[in-house]
């Protein structure tokens, strides 16, 4: 079957698969440039969470909660100052 533009379903499927692969490769590259930094996010601005009572993105109940992390450029976390000290590469309970 051919679409109005002349592309077959197979060609469209291949193009979609290539686009998904490109996005996936970009996401992997980004994780090499960032790190999880616990205790630096403001209320509701966390990227995700870990540990008991913690869910995921945007659910942090208070500022600088050490159970939640924010993705930051690699090598910057422990230099970030908060009212509770500096950011941490490990979760603070």
Image: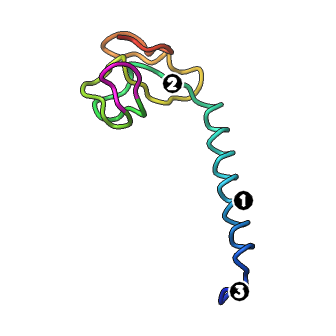
Crowding at label 3, few (<14), some or many (≥20) Cα neighbours within 10 Å? few
Q: Residue at x 42, y 12 (%)?
A: 86
| Foreground disc of the pair 2, 1 | 1
How far is disc 3 from disc 2 in space, using C-alphas? 47 Å
Pointer 3: what residue?
2
Q: CA distance from mark 3 to mark 1?
A: 20 Å
Q: Which residues are magenta?
A: 49-55
Mark 3 or 2, closer to the camera: 3
Q: Which residue is mark 1?
A: 18
Element at label 2: strand
Residue 24 x, y percent position in the rendering: 65, 47
Residue 36's label in the rendered image is 2
Q: Secondary structure at mark 1?
A: helix
Q: Quarter holding the C terminus? A: top left
Q: Name the image quarter holding the N terminus.
A: bottom right
List the single residue furthest toward the bottom. 4
Specify whether 77 is left or right of 75.
Answer: left
Could you tell me what secondary structure mostly forms the magenta stretch? loop
Magenta residue check for 52: yes
């Amino acid at each position: 079957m051919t679409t109005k533009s002349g592309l077959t379903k197979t060609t469209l499927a291949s193009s979609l698969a290539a686009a998904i692969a490109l996005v996936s490769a970009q996401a992997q590259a980004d994780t090499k440039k960032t790190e999880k930094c616990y205790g630096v996010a403001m209320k509701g601005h966390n990227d995700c969470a870990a540990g008991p009572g913690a869910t995921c993105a945007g659910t942090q109940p208070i500022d600088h909660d050490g159970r939640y992390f924010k993705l930051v450029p690699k090598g910057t976390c422990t230099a970030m100052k908060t009212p509770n000290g500096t950011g941490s590469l490990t979760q603070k309970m």
